[in-house]
Image (tube, rainbow, N blue to C red):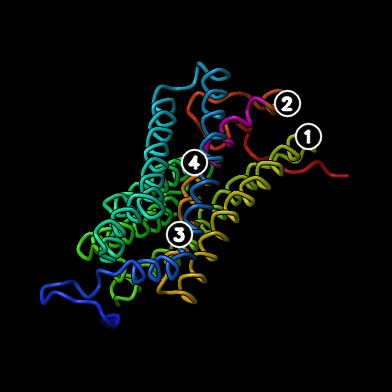
Amino acid sequence: MSESATPAGSISSPNSNPLADPLTVIRLLLASAPSTGALEVGTSFSMLLLGIAILQVWNYYRNFPNDPLPLKVLVALLLSVDMLHSVLFMHLTYHYTINGFVQALSAGDPSLLITTPWSLQAAISVGGAVILLVQLYYCHRIRLVTDNRLLVLACLVVVAARFALNVALTVTSVEHSSITVVTSYTFRWETISTMSVGAASDLFIAACMCIGLHQRRTGFSRSDRLVDRLISYTIASGAATSILSVVMLVIYITMPTTYIWMGFYSVLAKLFSNSLLASLNQRSIQHSQPRAHQSSSGSSSGFTFRKARPRPSV
């Protein structure tokens, strides 16, 4: 950043900071307005989704007290990590909109706005943990529905690849504690890879689930309608997270010097947690369907289907 010219008639100290100028701070704030605005909107919307998740958890424990303990623990753990994710984004938003602004003006030092807070690095890693929990459970559901070890292994590979890239992205953010890290080559390829692999893994897992559910069709219309409903929900949830990952990727590629994509990232983890909770709670709506009952193993949708049989001839 170039030094500001000293106003005529003023006396500057030889040791004065050339950046110690409120106008410089204000110009930096205006330049970061798009990133800050996207962060505020994203954090606000993610808080709305967190409220929906809390309501879904309450409904789950009320409607399914006989579910296996590991599934109950997973739901509690998922909500706890999701709430931590929201707290980190609230701290991040507070830093860039209030705390960092006040400190930069008080000290006359714009570098206080350039330094990234610890909550940014933590939010990236915690968001990755939320996605990991949800996708591992989806892999478990695919195992129950398809009983295809090779397919499950392929799902685990893409899930592990996504989480590994997320960890690498977190490490890079910690090593370069400045907002200028977005322009570095390492951060750039890690971010693009994480978003690309994320979008692909969402679609792949949804496709595997749909294949398994389709194989459970029995040839009876009422039972098949239930399967079709589950397939439709799986496609919708997988498409939602995948589309959001693609949107983040496009925004980052077209505006690589901003943090606008972080506003969308704050919402991504909430879509994952809500999709899992909704898939568990839908049993309370559909449990009365014929040949379907609440599963004690926490299977793909909470239902157990009979093995596929040939359709009756007409």
Name the secondary structure under disc 4. Answer: helix
**Which amino acid, mark 3?**
Thr
Q: Which residue is mark 3?
A: 36
In the image shown, does 115 or 147 lie closer to the viewer? 115
CB atoms of marks 3 and 4 within 8 Å: no
Give the mark, 4 or 1, whose residue is nearer the N terminus: 1
Residue 132 sits above or below residue 7 on the image: above
Q: Are marks 2 and 4 in contact (CB under 8 Å)?
A: no
Would you call the spot at circle 4 few (<14 residues within 10 Å), some (14-19), or many (20 or more)? many
On the question of residue 189 being in view, the answer is no
Q: Amino acid at mark 1?
A: Arg
Above or below, 305 against 104 in this view is: above
Residue at 31%, 59% in the rendered image: 105
**Which is more N-terminal, label 4 or label 2?**
4
Residue type at tag 4: Ser
Q: Nearer the viewer, mark 2 or mark 4?
A: 4
Which residue is identified by label 4?
Answer: 273
The image's mark for residue 165 is: none
Q: CA distance from mark 3 to mark 2?
A: 51 Å
Label 1: how many residues lie within 10 Å, few (<14), some (14-19) or many (20+)?
few
Which comes before the other along the chain, label 3 or label 4? 3
User: Which circle's residue, 3 or 2, is located before the other in the chain?
Assistant: 3
Rendered image: mark on residue 222: 1
Give the CA separation, mark 4 to mark 1. 30 Å
Determine whether the residue tagged by mark 2 lies in a helix, strand or loop.
loop
Q: Nearer the viewer, residue 10 or 199?
A: 10
Mark 4 or mark 1, whichever is nearer to me: 4
